[in-house]
Amino acid sequence: MRIWDIHPKHLCHKRLLAEHRELHGLWNILTKLNRIGGYSRHPETLRWVGKTNALYRRHKILVEEFKRRGYRHNSPLDKKLAKGLSKQKIFINTIKEQKLILKNKPCDCFK
Protein backbone atom coordinates (compact mmCIF):
# COMPACT_ATOMS: atom_id res chain seq x y z
CA MET A 1 0.00 0.00 0.00
CA ARG A 2 1.37 3.42 -0.90
CA ILE A 3 0.02 6.92 -1.15
CA TRP A 4 2.68 9.02 -2.86
CA ASP A 5 3.43 12.55 -1.70
CA ILE A 6 4.70 13.81 -5.04
CA HIS A 7 2.47 15.46 -7.61
CA PRO A 8 0.56 12.83 -9.62
CA LYS A 9 1.69 14.37 -12.92
CA HIS A 10 4.93 12.46 -12.33
CA LEU A 11 3.17 9.09 -12.04
CA CYS A 12 2.82 6.74 -14.97
CA HIS A 13 -0.61 5.36 -15.85
CA LYS A 14 -0.08 2.20 -13.79
CA ARG A 15 1.07 4.03 -10.62
CA LEU A 16 -1.64 6.69 -10.88
CA LEU A 17 -4.40 4.10 -11.09
CA ALA A 18 -2.81 1.97 -8.35
CA GLU A 19 -2.57 4.91 -5.97
CA HIS A 20 -6.19 5.84 -6.62
CA ARG A 21 -7.32 2.28 -5.91
CA GLU A 22 -5.22 2.10 -2.73
CA LEU A 23 -6.44 5.52 -1.59
CA HIS A 24 -10.03 4.25 -1.74
CA GLY A 25 -9.05 1.19 0.27
CA LEU A 26 -7.32 3.36 2.83
CA TRP A 27 -10.31 5.72 2.96
CA ASN A 28 -12.56 2.77 3.78
CA ILE A 29 -10.23 1.58 6.54
CA LEU A 30 -10.13 5.06 8.09
CA THR A 31 -13.82 5.95 7.77
CA LYS A 32 -15.59 2.65 8.51
CA LEU A 33 -15.94 2.21 12.27
CA ASN A 34 -15.85 -1.58 12.33
CA ARG A 35 -12.78 -2.08 10.14
CA ILE A 36 -10.00 -3.79 12.07
CA GLY A 37 -7.15 -6.09 11.20
CA GLY A 38 -5.49 -6.38 7.82
CA TYR A 39 -4.08 -3.06 6.76
CA SER A 40 -5.42 -1.11 9.75
CA ARG A 41 -1.97 -1.29 11.42
CA HIS A 42 0.07 -0.80 8.23
CA PRO A 43 2.52 2.16 8.48
CA GLU A 44 0.89 3.85 5.46
CA THR A 45 -2.50 3.57 7.15
CA LEU A 46 -1.20 4.84 10.48
CA ARG A 47 0.30 7.98 8.96
CA TRP A 48 -3.17 8.98 7.70
CA VAL A 49 -5.06 8.43 10.97
CA GLY A 50 -6.69 11.75 11.90
CA LYS A 51 -5.96 13.17 8.45
CA THR A 52 -8.88 12.12 6.27
CA ASN A 53 -9.13 15.77 5.21
CA ALA A 54 -5.58 15.53 3.82
CA LEU A 55 -6.43 12.22 2.16
CA TYR A 56 -9.55 13.79 0.64
CA ARG A 57 -7.35 16.56 -0.78
CA ARG A 58 -4.90 14.01 -2.21
CA HIS A 59 -7.82 12.27 -3.89
CA LYS A 60 -8.92 15.59 -5.38
CA ILE A 61 -5.43 16.09 -6.87
CA LEU A 62 -5.49 12.56 -8.30
CA VAL A 63 -8.90 13.23 -9.88
CA GLU A 64 -7.61 16.47 -11.41
CA GLU A 65 -4.76 14.47 -12.97
CA PHE A 66 -7.26 11.89 -14.22
CA LYS A 67 -9.19 14.64 -15.97
CA ARG A 68 -6.02 16.19 -17.38
CA ARG A 69 -5.17 12.83 -18.96
CA GLY A 70 -8.69 12.35 -20.29
CA TYR A 71 -9.65 9.58 -17.85
CA ARG A 72 -13.12 9.25 -16.39
CA HIS A 73 -13.66 9.29 -12.65
CA ASN A 74 -16.77 7.87 -11.00
CA SER A 75 -15.74 7.17 -7.42
CA PRO A 76 -16.06 10.33 -5.32
CA LEU A 77 -15.31 10.38 -1.61
CA ASP A 78 -17.82 11.63 0.94
CA LYS A 79 -16.58 15.10 1.92
CA LYS A 80 -18.49 14.86 5.22
CA LEU A 81 -15.99 12.22 6.32
CA ALA A 82 -12.97 14.44 5.61
CA LYS A 83 -11.82 15.37 9.11
CA GLY A 84 -8.63 16.41 10.84
CA LEU A 85 -5.52 17.91 9.38
CA SER A 86 -5.61 19.10 5.78
CA LYS A 87 -1.95 18.42 5.07
CA GLN A 88 0.19 15.33 5.48
CA LYS A 89 3.42 16.08 7.33
CA ILE A 90 4.55 12.54 8.11
CA PHE A 91 6.51 10.68 5.45
CA ILE A 92 7.63 7.07 5.29
CA ASN A 93 10.06 8.15 2.56
CA THR A 94 11.08 11.72 1.85
CA ILE A 95 9.97 13.32 -1.41
CA LYS A 96 13.51 12.90 -2.72
CA GLU A 97 13.47 9.19 -1.79
CA GLN A 98 10.04 8.75 -3.41
CA LYS A 99 11.32 10.27 -6.66
CA LEU A 100 14.29 7.89 -6.60
CA ILE A 101 12.03 4.90 -5.91
CA LEU A 102 9.89 5.82 -8.91
CA LYS A 103 12.88 6.46 -11.18
CA ASN A 104 14.13 2.95 -10.40
CA LYS A 105 10.84 1.23 -11.23
CA PRO A 106 10.37 -0.33 -14.69
CA CYS A 107 7.76 2.19 -15.81
CA ASP A 108 7.44 5.71 -17.21
CA CYS A 109 7.37 7.59 -13.90
CA PHE A 110 9.84 10.51 -14.05
CA LYS A 111 11.18 9.42 -17.42
Image: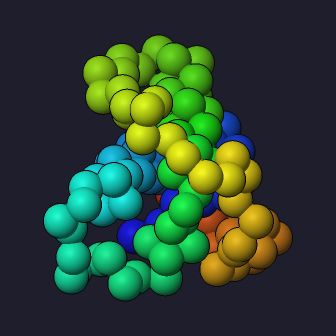
Above or below residue 105? Residue 83 is above
User: Residue 3, percent across and down?
Assistant: 52, 60
Q: State left or right for residue 37 relative to residue 5.
A: left
What color scheme is it?
A: rainbow
Above or below residue 70? Residue 88 is below
User: Residue 60, percent across and down?
Assistant: 56, 31
Q: Residue at x 54, y 46 (%)?
A: 83
Q: State left or right for residue 94 relative to residue 83.
A: right
Residue 69 in view in this figure: no
Above or below residue 46? Residue 67 is above
Depth order, front residue of 55/100: 55
Residue 78 in view in this figure: yes
User: Residue 4, percent across and down?
Assistant: 59, 59
Quadrant containing the N terminus is bottom left
Q: Residue at x 37, y 60 (%)?
A: 30
Depth order, front residue of 58/66: 58
- Please tell me in which quadrant of the rendered image residue 25 appears: bottom left
Q: How many marks?
A: 0
- Please tell me in which quadrant of the rendered image residue 37 appears: bottom left
User: Residue 33, percent across and down?
Assistant: 25, 61
Q: Residue at x 70, y 59 (%)?
A: 88
Q: Residue at x 37, y 31 (%)?
A: 78
Q: State left or right for residue 16 relative to residue 29.
A: right
